[in-house]
Image (cartoon, grey):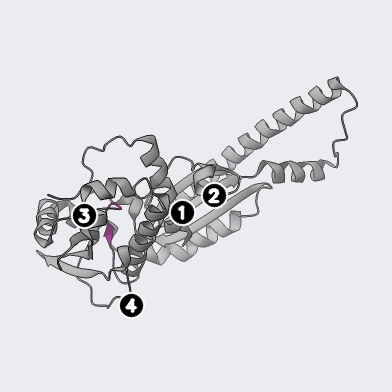
Amino acid sequence: MTGLRYVYAVCRPFGAALQAQLTGVAGAPPKLLTHHGLIAVVSEVPERDFAEEPLKAHLEDLDWLAATARGHQAVIDALTAVTTPLPLRLGTVFRDDSGVRVMMEAREDAFRRALDRLEGRVEWGVKVYLDLEAAEAAEAAEAARPQGKAASGRDYLRQRRMRSRSQDDMWEKAEAFSRRLHETLSGRAEDFRLHPPQNPTLSGAAGRNVLNAAYLVPRGNSEAFVEVVDRTKDDAPGLRVELTGPWAAYSFTEFHEEPAKAEEPEKAEASEKAEAPKKSGEPQEPREPQEEDA
């Protein structure tokens, strides 16, 4: 390979073959690079797009970022079907094979510890959304008291106050429902992460995101975990429970944590935008891109 090396994940050797027609970032097929009994899954990518300066520029192009996230996730999904991968950050690029091997050697112990902890486990994502309009309609129907047109300014203000109190009550009910659901699911998982609520403008999801959680579950327990989530979906009017997965354990691969750089607001929005193709096709949140290894 003569281009830069885009690294998707690190894993242990596996016997099953990846899909013959599998392509990843920039349409390039993934290759396996072995070092000290570990495998880095890499693709060759063009320097004109993935060198440090072009990559920074591309981060402002949400369409390019979304396409890159889809290619990244396609490879991670294929790996998850045959082994336990440790996904690296979106945009992890090195100059050549030697740079990848230096990274693997520097983090070898941490990679092995993470692989030991995550072997045979997958990540499930659970989100709860509150749709205020649907909740209000359900509440009005249940109470059989549809609101009439305000006859005066005083009636209008009274109805506004009642509606505001009603929305506050719905939000409290949604939070209470989410707490109960999280307690139930965390009791059936080995670990969990509570992520910040998603911005609806960027995610495109309807309603307000009340719960945004990831759960680490043994593969053998996944069916029971999914059944628990399914049983809750119709428990509360106006609430939508969304289950995604199984994914590679994005939210639980903490082996790479170097001091994190504070993202600029625009970069944070770009990262959240990139999550949509990953988890709708859906971490964890695509990671802050790592600069090219010199």
The answer to whether one can see residue 289 in this image is no
Q: Which quadrant is the N terminus positioned in?
A: bottom left
Mark toward the start of the polypeptide (4 vs 3): 4
Label 1 or label 3, whichever lies nearer to me, is 3
Q: Secondary structure at mark 4?
A: loop
Range of residues picked out in magenta: 84-90
Q: Is residue 5 above or below residue 89?
A: below
> Where does the image place residue 147, in percent across and percent down from the top left?
85, 36
> Where does the image place residue 159, in percent across and percent down from the top left?
80, 28
| Mark 1 vs mark 3, CA separation in Å | 22 Å
The residue located at (54%, 62%) in the rendering is 227
Point out the residue furthest to the top here: 154
Name the residue tied to disc 4: 21
Name the residue tied to disc 3: 93
Q: Secondary structure at mark 3?
A: strand
Name the residue tied to disc 1: 276
> Where does the image place residue 95, in percent across and percent down from the top left?
14, 56
Badge number at residue 204: 2
